[in-house]
Image (cartoon, rainbow, N blue to C red):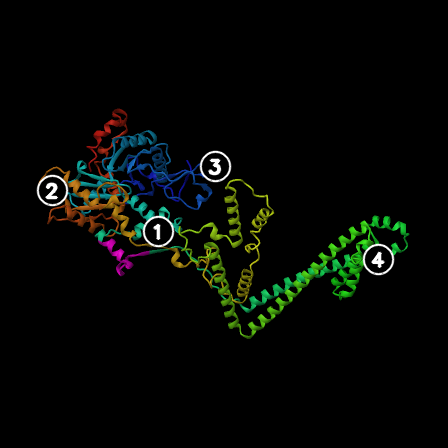
Amino acid sequence: MPFISKIERQSDYSSFSSSCPIVIDNGASYFRIGWAGENDPRVIFRNIVQRPRHKTTGETVTVVGDHNPALLKYFDCTRSGPRSAFESNVVYQFEIMEYILDFGFDRLGADQSQIDHPILITECACNPVQSRGKMAELLFESYGVPSVAFGVDAAFSYKYNQQLGICKDIGLAISSGFTTSHVIPFINGEPVYEACCRANVGGYHVTDYLKQLLSLKHPHHISKLTWEKVEELKMEYCYIAADYASEVQLFQRGDKEAEEKTRCWQLPWTPSPADEPPSEEELARKAALKEKQSQRLRDMAEAKRSSKINELENELKGLELLLEELKDTEDDQIVSFLASRGYTSKREVEAAFAKVTQTLRKAKGEQVPSDEKADASAAEKYYLIDIPDEELSAEQLKEKRRQVFLKSTTEARQRAKQKRLEEELEKEKEKKLEEQKRLENPERYMEQLRAKYKELSEKLEQRKRLKTNGNHANGNNNVSGGVGRGERLNAAQRERMRLLTTAAFDRGKGEDTFGQRDEDWQLYKLMSRDNDDDDDDKPDQDEAELARISSRLQEIDPSFFPGSESGASASEVPRFRPLTKEDFQIILGVERFRCPEVLFNPNLIGIDQSGLDEMVGVSLRRLPTWGQDLGDKMTTSILMTGGSCLYPGMAERLEAGIRMIRPCGTPIKVLRATDPIMDAWRGASTYAAAMQFPHQTFSRMDYYEKGEDWLRRYKFRYRI
């Protein structure tokens, strides 16, 4: 079976005899395996399994525990998330457990078809017989181990520290692990499982609670708050508050002490480059590039102009040849000759010749013919206008009306053209005058532009409010508090609505006589004039002037932003500030002690169970009455073990909590294991190396002869 892992395979498996036991600390968080008698396990990895597929070949691989993240970019992990064999510290997914054992034995160096070494494996206190039986079946049937022994991890840790002289024969072991917490009493060095207490709260719940709080507090960085990173933050920054309520009030007040207790995790951040003015070389480069582009455009325009001149000259030569041919053509053949060339009369050819000539002169930049010549050509073109109608035939009258229409439209276009020329000249004059003012006093010119921009902005904004609220600037005169449609209409539209209402009201009175009088039909004309006075569709001079001033300010003032003078409107895009270093910081304040508080108050996360200090009282009440001073002896040797006992302030908080539930003057001493995480495996390793261990195992012969049910009685034999 292919595995992906960064853990190296052990090479000295064959050097150990078959009588040397293999010790397994099967925790819900980490799996530790090694040889009995050694001080440290050989292989340690997270107790999870993931089975992704290769993105190219589709091959399924098994990822157990810690892996190399660089290799996972070739595998699709979206359909196969990490899975654990545990549920509240009890193994129930033995298919996953088989993958974990395969990986553990493989990395230990086992390459035979079966494992020929006795196995000592840890479990939680009061583990269900069904789970222990399935584990024994897996080890005997799949791996062929000769014998198996089970032991409680907290008991091994307490016994190991007892041998080191840290705790006494009579005491309590408080084991707070990954998913559960246990309190186990010890009398004369033997655990009393009948009096132990359990709560489904551990390090997993602390990490999950911290991840939720930080995700709510910093939603923009939720992708950075991975489970592994939150686990690191928990172990680095979290602590147990001696008095939770007082600590919360301290952070609510925001005192200096609270600021000192606040921690910050800085995310990777690259400052945006500062806006520096361009250098002279950069300006020169941009100017050269701009000149190059301008020259290219000029060359293109010149080439287009030359091409147009050539086309006009060729067309003019063609018309000249056509006029020369007309001189040699008989009068009765002129019409057919012109029809074959696409013309109807000689006058049309001459007009086309004059038009092409004038266009060619303009293209060459020559002087345009005078107005007298243009008037003469116009008189020749409209030769029927001055002749009375009595002297013209029907065809000539029709032609005269056409000439009158053409002349009127031509004159109208000329007047419009002349008006546009005058307006352009006026604008050019105003532009020169404005540029002269700017050169004389730039600061005053800019102030005047800003004032004009602000005035026009306020004027247009006021007009919008009036259009929305009618004649009421603030809209407060409306009885209903809203704005009716009539207040949004202009005067012409309101008059039209009045006429429609009047007509409908009159028609409901008796006989309908509308339309019998000529005056009635004037009503339709009045109704159709609702847009005559409406200026909504007409170009607004104020808006055009505002746009011009805004464009001008943007040219001469780089710090100007449209809307900054009169306040940004709802339609304008807001200006976002650049991100700073503070935007990429994860702040841990009250979360530092609020998350570990679930070990003492599980109701913070919705678990209705006792905390660690209350569990001590529950366990002491379950003890048999072996004397009045038994409880006092127990509290003088309270050993903390497990990964969740590493928080600063844990011992002080436990001592304060136990003192609240014990009689006044009771001696209380809370101790921490030498290594709360590794002492369980070391205690098991020491026990498996002892001489009495072979007599405490459950052999394969016992399994085949007595079955799994015999493991119910095995619990009386696995004292340590």
Is residue 77 rendered magenta in the image?
no
Q: What element carries label 2?
A: helix
Q: Which residue has dot 2 on it?
A: 630
Q: Which residue has dot 1 on it?
A: 217
Q: How far apart are marks 3 and 1 (CA)?
A: 40 Å
Q: Which residue has dot 4 on it?
A: 320
> Residue 392 at what x, y percent from top left?
82, 53
Q: How far apart are marks 3 and 2 (CA)?
A: 63 Å
Closer to the eye: label 4 or 3? 4
Q: Which residue has dot 3 on it?
A: 58
- Residue that lies at the very extreme toward the left in this rendered image: 628
Residues shaded magenta: 246-263
Work out whether 417 lies above or below 660.
Answer: below
Q: Distance between the residues labelled 4 and 3?
A: 82 Å
Query: Could you tell me if residue 189 is visible in this image?
Result: no
Q: Earlier in the sequence, mark 4 or mark 2?
A: 4
Quadrant of the rendered image containing residue 701: top left
- Other-residue count near label 2 (Cα within 10 Å), few / some / many at <14 / 14–19 / ≥20: some
